[in-house]
């Protein structure tokens, strides 16, 4: 009996150790948000839960394509960041898992998928950034652009930087914003005219604020929070929140067939918490979607921005058609 008991105890201990080992399996994250934010947030998550987390940082287009291609055998557990239309695209390909976090109940409806397959954790709005010194040198006595239409001035040719919508959710949001506020035909007329003045189409949404801040270009189109962050760091950037702008939410989703579901759910809960969203705002000047979380001082309140009623479903459904046309006619 002693031998049997010892054997059973050994098996039980082995199973217990195996369960503990499985619980501590690293959470794998595909991160579209900036490296600084991903690193700080994952470190806080590990500190609070004891669950190790690793992340791969890449552009929106690259990571969403990975999520869809790997949906039967995902190499990550979480997709962190990216506008809602990209998450809708992954959801339409059945690559995301439904999860109703207890913290969703207080969130605004625009921040939650009807199927609970993705959830917004911060609000993003587009604007125009201007390097005051370069603008004054290049265009002495000229008024700074105050609207989207002002950017069509031929004088600005080569002085505008806009990310590539094939890779960046920032630029795709801008493209869809023009198509939705002006209508399909007039929207394309605007985009094709503006493209003639763009001096560079970098892949990363973080590039325009940096290129404007360092004075390589006079004008850039980017998220207002990214421009605000660079200005707060001492870069010479003026912020313009043009009328009829567009906003969306940065989202988080659990990947279908994740091999670490328990940890993935805990990470979603963490990202929807007041602590995580206030930390995100302090790092990146974003606006939290959790109504109990306070944005950092210096960020531009949503109430001060004139936004169109943006149709995220249309943006998702038109993605392939829009990007195919952009490839043919612009780049």
Image (cartoon, grey):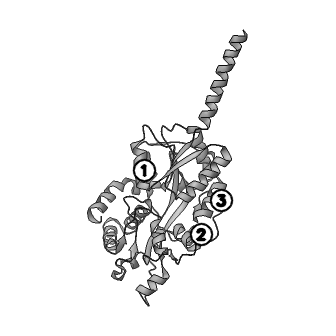
Residue 179's image quarter? bottom left
Inter-mark Cα distance, 2 to 3 = 13 Å
Which residue does the numbered mark 2 point to in the structure image? 299
- Residue 251, visible in the rendered structure: yes
Residue 265's image quarter? top right
Q: Which mark is residue 293?
A: 3
Q: Residue at x 64, y 29 (%)?
A: 17
Point out the tag, 3 or 1, that comes first from the N-terminus.
Answer: 1
- Residue 143, visible in the rendered structure: no
Quadrant where the N terminus is found in the figure: top right
Q: Assess disc 3: are there few (<14), some (14-19) or many (≥20) residues with their C-alpha within 10 Å of its C-alpha.
A: some
Looking at the image, residue 308 lies above or below residue 45: below
Which residue does the numbered mark 1 point to in the structure image? 64
- Seen from the viewer's position, the closer of residues 140 and 296 is 140
Q: Residue at x 63, y 25 (%)?
A: 15
- Seen from the viewer's position, the closer of residues 23 and 91 is 23
């Amino acid at each position: 009996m002693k031998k049997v008991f010892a054997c059973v105890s050994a098996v039980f201990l082995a199973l217990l150790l195996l369960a503990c080992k499985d619980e501590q399996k690293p959470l794998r994250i595909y991160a579209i948000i900036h490296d600084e934010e991903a690193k700080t947030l994952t470190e806080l998550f590990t500190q609070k839960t004891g669950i190790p987390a690793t992340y791969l940082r890449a552009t929106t287009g690259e990571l969403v394509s990975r999520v869809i291609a790997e949906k039967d055998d995902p190499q990550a557990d979480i997709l962190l960041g990216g506008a809602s239309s990209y998450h809708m695209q992954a959801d339409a390909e059945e690559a995301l898992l439904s999860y109703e976090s207890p913290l969703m109940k207080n969130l605004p409806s625009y921040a939650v998928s009807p199927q609970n397959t993705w959830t917004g954790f911060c609000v993003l709005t587009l604007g125009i950034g201007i390097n005051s010194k370069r603008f004054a040198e290049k265009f002495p006595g000229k008024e700074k652009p105050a609207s989207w239409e002002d950017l069509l001035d031929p004088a600005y040719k080569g002085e505008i930087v806009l990310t590539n919508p094939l890779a960046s959710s920032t630029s795709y949001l801008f493209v869809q914003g023009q198509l939705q506020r002006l209508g399909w035909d007039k929207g394309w007329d605007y985009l094709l005219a503006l493209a003639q003045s763009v001096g560079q189409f970098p892949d990363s949404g973080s590039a325009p604020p940096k290129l404007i801040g360092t004075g390589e270009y006079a004008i850039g189109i980017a998220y207002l929070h990214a421009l605000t962050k660079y200005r707060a760091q001492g870069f010479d950037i003026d912020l313009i929140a043009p009328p009829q702008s567009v906003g969306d939410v940065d989202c988080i989703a659990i990947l279908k067939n994740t091999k670490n579901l328990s940890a993935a759910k805990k990470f979603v809960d963490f990202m929807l918490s007041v602590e995580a969203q206030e930390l995100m705002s302090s790092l990146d000047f974003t606006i939290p979607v959790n109504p109990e979380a306070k944005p950092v001082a210096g960020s531009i309140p949503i109430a001060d921005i004139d936004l169109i009623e943006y149709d995220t479903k249309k943006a998702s459904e038109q993605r392939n058609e829009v990007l195919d046309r952009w490839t043919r006619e612009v780049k």
